[in-house]
Image (cartoon, helix red, strand yellow):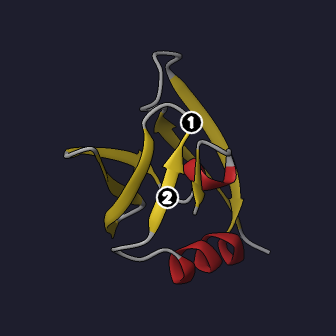
Amino acid sequence: MDKRILVFKDLTNDKGLTKFYLEDEEKSKFIKEISPGLKVIHKRFGEGEVFQVENSIISVIFKGELKKFPFPDVFTEGYIKKI
């Protein structure tokens, strides 16, 4: 199985860079399940709606504000969950 290292800036706080090790199959699974219009909840920002999933970045609208996160890591690390 091909493992890849993805390095993203953690957009939910100021702790710097975080490394996530993901299997390609896990990433494919999340990409298929997550699509625009999906209702989600974030630990800090509350309820939101997925606006766009593109190039390993997910955009979510929270109370009229667009936020971007590393995808699917924001889900696998538990910051965002599907409602």
The quadrant of the picture occupied by the N terminus is bottom right
Question: In the drawing, what numbered circle is on residue 51?
Answer: none
Image location of residue 63, percent across then percent down: 27, 44
Identified at 58% across, 63% down, the residue is 82
Q: Nearer the viewer, residue 53 or 37?
A: 37
* Mark seen at residue 43: 1
5 left or right, relative to 63: right
On residue 40, which mark appears? 2
> What is the secondary structure assignment of the residue under circle 1?
loop
Q: Residue drawn 43% across and 71% down? A: 38
For image coordinates 49% across by 74% down, the residue present is 34
Can you give x and y, in whole percent of width and height, for residue 56 in the image?
A: 42, 61
Above or below: residue 61 compared with residue 51: above
Please state which amino acid type lies under the numbered disc 2: Val
In percent of width and height, residue 67 lies at: 30, 43
Q: Is residue 51 left or right of residue 41?
A: left
Residue 51 location in percent, x, y?
28, 65
